Image (spheres, helix red, strand yellow):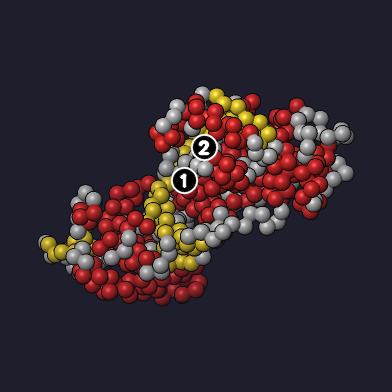
Amino acid sequence: MYQAVKEIVDSALGVSSVLEKPRDKNFGHFALPTFSFAKELRKAPQIIAQEFAEKLESLPQIASVNVVNGYVNFSVSEEFLGQCAWEFLQENSHKKAPQKSILLEYVSANPTGPLHIGHARGAAFGDSLARIGRFLGYAIHTEYYVNDAGAQIEKLGKSIYYAGRALLFGESSELPQECYQGEYVFELAEEAKKELGNSVFESLESLDKLCLFGKDKMLQEIKNNLAQVGITFDTYASEKELFAQWDSTLESLKAHQGVYESEDKLWLQSTTYGDEKDRVIVRENGEPTYLAGDIIYHKDKFERNFEHYINIWGADHHGYIARVKAAIAFLGFEAQKLEVLLAQMVALLKDGKPYKMSKRAGNFILMKDVAEEVGADALRLMFLSKKPDTHLEFDVELLKKQDSSNPVYYINYAHARIHTLFSKSDFNIESFKNLPLDKSIKSLKGMQENLCNLLVSALGINKVLADAFSQRLVNKVVDYLYTLAGEFHHFYNETKILNTENTEQILRVLAVVAHSIALGLSLLGVKAKVSM
């Protein structure tokens, strides 16, 4: 509805407006600040507001207009609301014009252990951002970068090797300090014994087999963990496979004067693009560093010609941004096309105390364990309730409460309540989607103010989704749904709904409210409940 109103206002006034929501609902449905026009029009905001108000008053879509301190406040007509409500409920009403193509990379946890709760925040954020973007018309391709080359995979192989020797030959069950710790390593060793045979543990000559075996098993477990909370990826990019492009990548860096030799090492001249110091990309022994793999990967990304690139990284990777962007520039690409979003870690509590670490994971809290305890929907919604770059602490016991303190329950309860009302009435919520336009408009005439305000709020979801995506703040959707649920609960408690002369009209509005809640939850990866 916001975009439709904006187009009407802009056309009438000959400006590009920014419409706001009035702090006081008594002022109207929308507020148009005029302060930004003062310099161009050489008039005081109050005078501009009066002139704008006179023009808006003549529009058939506008029901009332008032001016307050340089703001033009106005309400839209019931006929216009009826049309917007009808369009919103139509099956194809949400199809948008194609937007730019985006490659979105997120999670990308090393395949050396199970996903922990820190990974879960970036996973929920990335998946929901992709869902919202696709809804808005963006061509979003999601990708998981698999770090399956280098020291961490060799470390995994050795960890399995020593765990296998402990199982088979009675050697110490305490793995060397340089190994990955946790019961999952012994589980991998047990599986390797069954699938590869005891011989792989006789000497380190079979280390490559164990490395590959362990990586494949952990990657499959990661995929299963993600699927448990409704997350899948379009593609998985292998660092090991991409290293075949190292020579051509290095040549490209040299051609753009991006590297130099010093102290028997090869350095990326990243200070040229704002990094605090230059970075080593090839060690004295000729081995590429971890950064080299990322440079190859980003070269491969940019060669796929997406219009924009988004990476979601953990907050500990903040210092990594400048060096990667420097490499992209030295490869001859537009570094500004890469956008890096950071997700902070999570502090998890249970009854006010730190959540118990997983022995299986070796002193980590597993995403799988928390999802099984509170449910995937609750886990996702809680992770999405705050800005991703802010600290998040929550108690899992909160997600079991059945009151307004639990946003998962509160939002779902609103949706379920509406469906319960329909089940007790003579109307079918789905039938309202097939109602002819003229009947939809007619049925919403004469609405009480509180019902009209509830409808306006429900029709505001598309603006919220557009803002959430453009600002990369998925928490705006959670906030909106919580507020809308609150408005509905208040209306429900204050209004007799069934068996009145206004029952049909009220239920038509509540069908829109339910549609908004279900849509918003689905784009957060949560299925709206119809009963509770």
Q: Say what secondary structure mark 1 lies in.
A: loop
Residue farthest to the top, as pictured: 69
Q: Say what secondary structure mark 2 lies in.
A: strand
Residue corresponding to mark 2: 394
Query: Which residue is at 19% across, 61% downward?
Result: 267
Three-letter amino acid code at the position of disc 2: Phe
Query: Which residue is at 27% across, 74% downward?
Result: 248
Location of residue 421 in the rendering, given as x and y in whole percent from the top left corner: 80, 40
Residue 123 shown left or right of residue 403 in the figure? left
* Residue 154 appears in view: no
Location of residue 360 in the rendering, given as x and y in whole percent from the top left corner: 48, 53
Query: Which residue is at 64% across, 36% downward?
Result: 58
Instruction: In the rendered view, tell whether residue 216 sits above or below residue 76.
Output: below
Q: In which quarter of the view is residue 165 placed?
A: bottom left
Instruction: In the rendered view, tell whether residue 76 sits above or below residue 220.
Output: above
Instruction: In the rendered view, tell whether residue 269 sits above or below residue 379.
Output: below
Residue 153 shown left or right of residue 10 in the figure? left
Foreground of the two, 29 or 58: 58
Location of residue 178 in the rendering, given as x and y in whole percent from the top left corner: 31, 57
Q: CA distance from mark 1 to mark 2?
A: 24 Å
Q: Which mark is residue 208?
A: none
Query: Which residue is at 62% across, 57% downward?
Result: 95
> Where is the N terminus found, in terms of image quarters?
top right
Instruction: In the rendered view, tell whether residue 344 sits above or below residue 487.
Output: below
Foreground of the two, 336 or 358: 336
Packing grade of label 2 (10 A; few <14, some 14-19, many >=20) is: some
Q: Are marks 1 and 2 in contact (CB under 8 Å)?
A: no
